[in-house]
Amino acid sequence: MKVAILGAGQLGRMLALAGYPLGIACELYDQTAETPGGQVAKITAGAFDDYRKLTALARRADVVTFDWENVPVESLRVILRSTPVYPQPAALEVAQDRLLEKTAFGQLGIPTVGFAAVNTRADLDAAALKLGLPGILKTRRFGYDGKGQVRIHRAADMGRAFAALAGQPLIYESFVNFSREVSLIGVRGSTGETAFYPLTENVHEQGILATSRAPCRAGSLQASAERYMRSIFKKYKYVGVLAIEFFVANGRLIANEMAPRVHNSGHWTIEGARTSQFENHLRAICGLPLGDTSATGHAGMVNLIGRLPKKKTVLAVRGLHLHDYGKTEARPGRKLGHLTLVTSSARSRDLALGRALKLR
Amino acid sequence: MKVAILGAGQLGRMLALAGYPLGIACELYDQTAETPGGQVAKITAGAFDDYRKLTALARRADVVTFDWENVPVESLRVILRSTPVYPQPAALEVAQDRLLEKTAFGQLGIPTVGFAAVNTRADLDAAALKLGLPGILKTRRFGYDGKGQVRIHRAADMGRAFAALAGQPLIYESFVNFSREVSLIGVRGSTGETAFYPLTENVHEQGILATSRAPCRAGSLQASAERYMRSIFKKYKYVGVLAIEFFVANGRLIANEMAPRVHNSGHWTIEGARTSQFENHLRAICGLPLGDTSATGHAGMVNLIGRLPKKKTVLAVRGLHLHDYGKTEARPGRKLGHLTLVTSSARSRDLALGRALKLR
């Protein structure tokens, strides 16, 4: 079985590594061969709109997927003429645009934040009037890790915020006073079979995921989150792994965004679940039965951002797992790797996570 | 960190896969590039006595190791001039020759079977007289998976047995009426740090490992096995993973053979232990701290020999993990992959293992 993956970052790398034991060979595609994924699997370098190269790649594969959310949907539609693409390009198209995404949440009855499209300064004034302050002005497309967004605390901030982002289609979102952030990672197979990991609690720092812990205190939130995800699965006849990030406010879930791919908040599943999100994504898109998503213990994950701690120091900590993405260039804000730990209780997990955080 | 691995079979493949998350890049070396290991990492094809190629390989690496027991020790000694080799060639030299191996066991006070060198038919008669019948006549070198050995039940078998193996240095071993077979996988780091996995119980079919389960009922055997392994570690200032296979007879361990490398009976550690034997071997030879060897549950392993079952059938079984070695040619007796399962009790493990066996 051959899978082509558009994008060869750490997600593509971990997908390729999950493929080998299953006898699934991944071929990656990215703008340059010098990528985390290109170190562990065959890679072709090319532009994401080079239809000739993409079609040749697709013809070598049984199925095509992506590790990068900004793959042009038009390229996927070209590929579809020769090879199946999962998750469905229609789901990616919606996830690429915050306005389409939140509109879809609304149509499916998934609670989300108040939002309004903003193209002009007048739109912003109207949106703030309707939805109130504080709020966040965001680009509709190409935002990630907190990039492309400006918080608006008071009316006086509006001019500066608009000027910072103007020239791109924008969205104004009301600010949610949340108590915590959680995400659901789920997967749907080509036969309609679904499986969900336990809810993960996430902490962001400067807009970038810092830590995850799973399973988290969830109560009835698990069932609600799964119900919401099922409605998205149904809408797109979705195949593959899907992530939804939620705020928890007043004990209820508010969907923030979805990612039609394996997700940073699911990295703990490599050691912390019976089947990793990477393996389950490959199983789903290859038409294989899904694997057990149950947790093997209490897992914690720490992102390594901007710099990697000394390997000797990290590996000297009993039970700590290192994932080095093989990036040759360290930059502030760049995800270079992550640490995982799995313990027998939530309390020991939280203690170990606290110690692991100090290693960064 | 760069590791060169001589031999690119399934062991080299799983070593290379374990290296990636640690940021350790493995380069493999084998007689042909079309190997299980060559599918997942850079590989150089060459003869095992091509000193020029081997030296060039070693110069690209920080450390050299091997996944194949019959690598010529002389080649390792040539490599040693430019790069460290772990485990030590002296340990491999002893493991390659059943006579040296059993002599070493005896010198270290490790109980082993009765044995005698056999070069002539007269030697065989004398050995059988001294050690009794039944017994097994084996080649001293190049035996694996039950190859290169003939059982001798009665005096009348001796002529045929000797004729079958004559022309090579042989060893006669007395037959052990064992109740079960177990193996110990342990690891020693370059600072002298050691760690041991729980004893594994193994069942062989036609001389080839069929199933392993771990942890197995061990009682005081665990401590004895660790004591024996420590004496080998000390003798060679050993660095890396070492396996010793034992018979259990009358409740006591009798060492059968040792393997100075990762071992088939340790494959369960990928899912069943906090740190796999593959990761620990790399940690050891790269001078990194060792990882936690404790079991995460009750693990079972089934070798897939001669043919691979249908992927869909295997992956439909909840909790079953597939490891496909990517061998393009299936042959009777050839190890093509393995299955692993991890459960919460020994009883549920044994039930699941029974079901998994039927999938072969």
Image: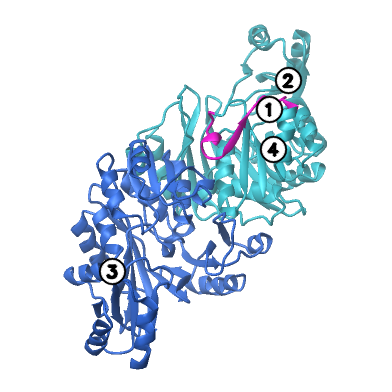
Chain colours: A cyan, B blue
* Magenta stretch, residue numbers: A34-51
Q: Amino acid at mark 2?
A: Ile
Foreground disc of the pair 1, 4? 1
Which chain letter goes with mark 3? B
Which chain letter goes with mark 1? A
Q: Is residue B254 above or below residue A55?
A: below
Distance CA(mark 2)–CA(mark 3) = 66 Å
Distance CA(mark 1)–CA(mark 4) = 11 Å
Q: Amino acid at mark 3?
A: Ala
Question: Residue tagged by mark 3?
Answer: B225
Question: Residue tagged by mark 4?
Answer: A260
Whether residue A313 is visible here, answered yes or no, is yes
- Give the SS element for disc 2: strand
The reply to the same-chain question for discs 2 and 1 is yes
Question: Residue tagged by mark 1?
Answer: A70
Q: Is residue A5 above or below residue A216?
A: above
Q: Residue B185: x and y, percent?
A: 35, 62
